[in-house]
Image: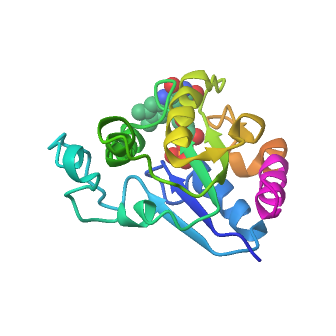
Amino acid sequence: MARKTLILNGSPRPQGNTAALIETLRTKLSGEVIEISAFRSGIAPCVDCRSCWTTAKCAVRDGMQTIYDDDFDNVVIASPVYYGTLPGQMLSLMSRLQPWHAAKFFLNRPLELREKKAAVILTAGGKGNADMALHHVRALCRMLNAKGFAEHWVCSPNTDEIPADQDEKAVADVIALAKWLNEEQT
Ligand SMILES: Cc1cc2nc3c(=O)[nH]c(=O)nc-3n(C[C@H](O)[C@H](O)[C@H](O)COP(=O)(O)O)c2cc1C
């Protein structure tokens, strides 16, 4: 059965570098694809209301429900690098996973989340040092029960000079990511 993929898009630019690599990925993915834009989805940041400390649920009703539903097999974090890490809007979206943290650590009722594959696509204007970005990705993937990004991440550096869609290595690597994501086995 074709696998369902959730793409978390951290770029504000609809025709930008990240968008170009997402488009390449989409053309090669065989199953359903849902994309959430950290900049355009209107997903609010966590305001630490602490309702989830007792309910394990988020009090805010917005597009985050798609993620809470946990109905996907792959997650792809696709984002530009900002100041060495993920843009604030991606971190803001990530903060909304606090109910899952509360369920596990405050209520001692960890959720049984589907095990997913995780892949990462980064673009960077400069050299593309991805250490800090990958540090945040690791935390995000742990929350999502998504595995494998350490061996399945792509960075297109130097986009100030060469746009990502002309970065032949990055494009080939994204196509390889799609192939892996399409495979049944984790
Ligand atoms: C606020 C801001 C911070 C950035 N910080 C970095 C950085 O730390 N390192 C880097 O290599 N590029 C940095 N860049 C450049 C972007 O990562 C680069 O232009 C990227 O390809 C943009 O992707 P997009 O077109 O998909 O939005 C920054 C850009 C912006 C707007």
Residue 135 location (% of width, % of height): 55, 26
Q: Is residue 109 visible?
A: yes
The correct choice, above or below, for 136 with respect to 22 in the image is: above
- Is 175 a magenta residue? yes
Question: Which residue is located at x 61 percent, y 49 percent?
Answer: 17
Residue 142 location (% of width, % of height): 54, 39
Depth check: give the residue in front, 29 or 150.
Answer: 150
Question: Which residue is located at x 47 percent, y 31 percent?
Answer: 82
Task: Give the dominant element type of the magenta stretch: helix, strand or loop.
Answer: helix
The quadrant of the image that shows the N terminus is bottom right
The correct choice, above or below, for 59 with respect to 107 in the image is: below
Residue stretch rendered in magenta on the structure? 172-186
User: How is the model colour-coded?
Assistant: rainbow
Depth check: give the residue in front, 21 or 110.
Answer: 110
Q: Is residue 81 visible?
A: no
Question: Which residue is located at x 57 percent, y 33 percent?
Answer: 138
Depth check: give the residue in front, 30 or 49.
Answer: 49
The correct choice, above or below, for 134 with respect to 63 in the image is: above
